[in-house]
Image (tube, coloured by chain):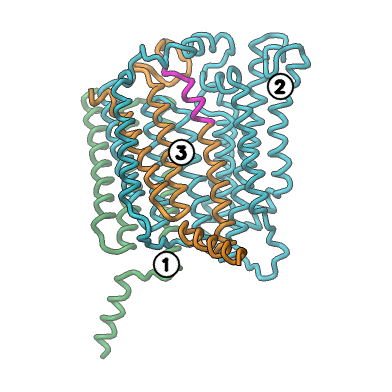
Chain colours: A cyan, B green, C orange
Amino acid sequence: MSAINLLIDIVLLTMLVFTTIAIVRSRSLFAIVMLSGIYSLLSANIFVVLDAVDVAFTEAAVGAGISTVLMLATIGITGYEQKKRRSISRITPLIVVFITGAVLVYGTLDMPAFTNPSNPVHEHVAPRFIEQSPTEVGIPNMVTSVLASYRGYDTMGEVIVVFAALIGVLSLLGIREKKTDPVYTEPPPRPILQVMAKFMIPFIILFALYVQFHGDFGPGGGFQAGVIFSVAIILYTLTFSQQDAMDLVPPWVLKRLAALGVLIYGGTGVVSLLKGGNFLDYNVLAHDPIHGQHYGILIIEFGVGLTVACVMILIFFAFISRGDKNP
Amino acid sequence: MNFIIDALSWACLMLGCFLGISGAIGIFRFDEFYSRAHAASVTDTLCVLFIISGLVLQSGFNLVTVKMIFIVVLLWLTSPVASHALIRSAYQTGLKPKLAITRKESSKRTQS
Amino acid sequence: MILDLYNYWVVIFLMMSGFYTLIASNHLIKKIVGLNIFQSSVFMLYISMGKVAGGTAPIAAEGIDTYSNPLPHVLILTAIVVGIATTSLALALVIRIKESYDTVQENEILELDRISDEETQA
């Protein structure tokens, strides 16, 4: 790592430390949520410095975007205040934390140096991925090829976890459509914001599609694209009203599409089974293994993007429809 | 020629950094919400312009330049709107600017 | 020496601050924020391990032969999205707790629980 990169890394990490101290010390929940947004943005910058562009992309979209909005929706319901309390002393947690931290620091003294190419992490399977994936899978972005092809099972598990979280949120909160509510009133128009949002949303959606289908060649993929797409809808909901957004993308459609995404992923595996390969072995999908890999990755990334986008939008709908009910 | 381009881009970068830092100082030093938001939003756009144009001069004309110009356009569109939304919601929740109160008070004093 | 391990030490600091927030705070949402800090410190640890000196982002290009390790990136990329999904589940639980107990302070919830237990026994 060059000297200037190391300097940027250290400065950003130090800023992260100060942000964390501010989060721990602050009493205002609103400030805590905003600071955790800043925390996510800083960590996304650090990921860029550490060469993890795909991860930085995801962290910026998820951490600074959706996570902050969901936290704000929640504290809008639970209230901004944090009461003081003196029943438990702070000494015991501090002692526990210091002892654990000291043990961990003692453990790092045996760790190999940061960025050393001969670290054990880089000795095992990583060289095979780096050397073979451009010829075996045939796409330049190794993160996508490892994500969708070599570790396809793992990613399928993650998609199912996201889907299961959606089921949990919907069964806890549910989505209340506002049409039947007699006391519901239209929010006041916000012309500047609405014009701006109308202008921006097509570009955000275009960018999401670019990220989705260009993920084989540059940073991007289904997870990031899904999150960016849902950000477009969330922007629409925030500037217009919940009713407008629910007319645009009805929740019952989203529920079916989220399930469809998981089905596309699993179905690709079943198709490859039927064609005589292993589960999620894309080599058999076309006459040529490389083409098969291309098709397979494109299809399952589409499934991932569909599920993630629908899940994020539905979770957001669930939170805000609950919020308006209890002002 | 190289020297001139380097000097120009460094001048741009330094000016951008100065604007950014002065905006940050403004956020911390001003005593009231509206002047803080004003300090941040006014310096923001020009700071972005100078820093990105410094970087464009460094990179030469290629695809990266186009992407950076896109960044400028995006930030110029979103940053003032975000400041507008922030200040508008602050005003609607009942936070009054200090200046308005003092002017009203002073006019009352002159009337009486 | 210090520079070699600086990233890891920052990770440990972040992890311990998240842990402290989790056990010392009384407010459920602040606990969730602490859990998020803990989680993202683990992300930072993985990504720090994946970095190789002189490497670039793991996207194959002409004339580059050193890449950073793509495997941690894959693991963390999916972990972030799963993290927000589980965080939203936790927040949904907090909303339900607020609706049934009318508070999100841990000691008040425990107090209400104790009172209702005594009532059922009596």
**Residue A93 % position (x, y):** 35, 46
Using the image as rendered, state which of residue A219 and residue B99 is in the foreground. A219
Judging from the image, what secondary structure is the residue with disc 1 in? Answer: helix
At which x and y percent is residue A141?
Answer: 52, 20
Are the residues tagged 2 and 1 within 8 Å (C-beta)?
no
Identify which amino acid the numbered label 3 is placed on.
Ala
Place of residue A96 in the rendered image (x, y in percent of width and height, measured from the top left): 34, 42
The amino acid sitting under disc 1 is Tyr
- Tell me what residue is drawn at x 44 percent, y 32 percent: A56
Which residue lies at the image location 56% right of the left edge and 57% below the top edge?
C97
Q: Which residue is mark 2?
A: A269
Name the mark on residue A60.
3
- The quadrant in which the N terminus of chain A is found is top left
* Same-chain status of marks 2 and 3: yes
- Given the image, what chain letter belongs to the residue carrying mark 2? A
Q: Give the CA separation, mark 2 to mark 3.
A: 31 Å
On whether residue C70 falls in the magenta region, the answer is yes
Q: Chain of mark 1?
A: B
**Residue closest to the eye, A235 or B59:** A235
Decide whether residue A220 is among the magenta residues: no
- Asked if A127 appears above or below A4 in the picture, the reply is above
Q: Which residue lies at the image location 24% right of the left edge and 51% below the top edge? A: B25
Q: Position of residue A185 (x, y in %)?
A: 63, 68
Q: Secondary structure at mark 2?
A: helix
Highlighted magenta segment, given as a residue range? C67-78
- Circle 3 packing at 10 Å, graded few (<14), some (14-19), many (20+), is many
Amino acid type at mark 2: Gly
Which of pointers 2 and 3 lies earlier in the amino acid sequence? 3
